[in-house]
């Protein structure tokens, strides 16, 4: 029985298939990083049921990616039926087929020392040729074909993100800002570190000593010094240059540490200002003030 369509269809469904050793696992992880609900090697008979559950998730699942390989495909007719039924749940249902040359696939299997699923009782090349013949009908049905022979992991991820990502490079990276005090050690998970200990220190102002960089009095004190916004501007410019390039190369997370002596005043104020400026540029950074509650130092 055909499932009932509604205005609340899934945003998109992608069926990932192709040659073993062509990069389906990398594609799977790429879609997962883009926020798709992903399932690997699901029996084709269960795929429509999964789409139905996603459709009924009240918006919790809006994009679905399924990996279908030679082990779960039931011939051309079965795959065509799968695609037809998945279109009941999304106006955008794409078949992505990944392939690579026989020589490249053979080299990849030799390097990983894994057994090709079609070569358990034959040579590796014979298994590759057999699978290519069996999947030829899937390739003909594909909307998108990517030859990964000359692509590394990062290049394939970037290609998939450019083709299927609804997020721009601006929002495609998980950005965190953390203030800290060098006195208490640098954050071990920081990708970038900036030292703002050269800025005037509110610690030496009696009425500000016990406050933090989140208090308006500290902020008002620091904005009186031109170097405060000079360093904020320079850090911002560098981040706006680096972050899209990090995202393009497949980097999913970036943690930026801003440090002062005790982590209570200058670094806190700078992080808050950077968060505001980055939001204006389309980012949504998470913020943590690691040492602001440790006492005046």
Image: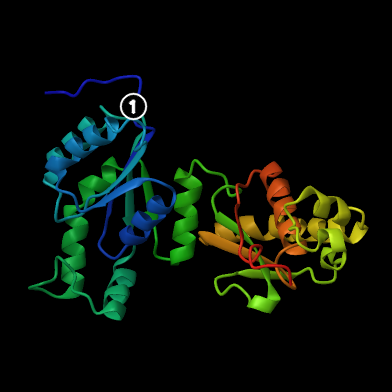
Location of residue 198 (image quadrant): bottom right
* Residue under the image location 19 percent in, 41 percent down: 47
Question: Residue 81, can we see it?
Answer: yes
Q: Is residue 143 above or below residue 179?
A: above
Q: Nearer the viewer, residue 18 or 236?
A: 236
* Residue under the image location 58 percent in, 56 percent down: 175
- Left or right of 59? Residue 257 is right
Q: Quadrant of the N terminus?
A: top left
- Left or right of 196? Residue 55 is left
Q: How is the image coloured?
A: rainbow
Q: What SS does tag 1 mark?
A: loop
Location of residue 176 (image quadrant): bottom right
What x and y, as percent, mark residue 297?
74, 72
What x and y, as percent, mark residue 231?
82, 61
Question: Residue 151, can we see it?
Answer: no
- Residue topped by disc 1: 9
Q: Nearer the viewer, residue 83 or 197?
A: 197
- Left or right of 35? Residue 263 is right
* Residue under the image location 81 percent in, 55 percent down: 218
What x and y, as percent, mark residue 266?
77, 62
């Amino acid at each position: 029985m055909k499932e009932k369509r509604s205005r609340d269809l899934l945003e998109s469904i992608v069926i990932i298939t192709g040659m073993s050793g062509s990069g389906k696992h990398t594609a799977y992880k790429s879609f997962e990083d883009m926020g798709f609900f992903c399932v690997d090697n699901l029996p084709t008979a269960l795929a429509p049921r999964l789409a139905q559950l996603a459709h009924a998730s009240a918006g919790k699942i809006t994009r679905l990616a399924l990996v279908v390989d030679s082990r779960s495909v039931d011939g051309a007719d079965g795959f065509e039926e799968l695609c037809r039924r998945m279109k009941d749940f999304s106006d955008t249902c794409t078949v992505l087929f990944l392939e690579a040359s026989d020589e490249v696939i053979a080299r990849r299997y030799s390097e990983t020392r894994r057994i090709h699923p079609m070569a358990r009782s034959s040579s590796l090349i014979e298994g590759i040729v057999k699978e290519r013949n069996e999947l030829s009908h899937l390739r003909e049905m594909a909307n998108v074909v990517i030859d990964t022979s000359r692509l590394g992991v990062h290049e394939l991820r970037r290609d998939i993100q450019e083709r299927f990502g609804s997020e721009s490079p601006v929002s495609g990276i998980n950005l965190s800002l953390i203030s800290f005090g060098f006195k208490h050690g640098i954050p071990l998970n920081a990708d970038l570190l900036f030292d703002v200990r050269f800025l005037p220190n509110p610690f030496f102002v009696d009425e500000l000593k016990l406050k933090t960089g989140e208090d308006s009095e500290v902020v008002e004190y620091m904005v009186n010094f031109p170097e405060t916004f000079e360093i904020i501007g320079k850090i911002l410019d560098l981040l706006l240059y680096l972050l899209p390039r990090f995202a393009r190369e497949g980097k999913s997370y970036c943690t930026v540490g801003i440090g002062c002596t005790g982590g209570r005043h200058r670094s806190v104020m700078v992080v808050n200002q950077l968060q505001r400026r980055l939001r204006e540029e389309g980012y949504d950074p998470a913020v943590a003030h690691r040492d602001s509650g440790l006492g005046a130092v």
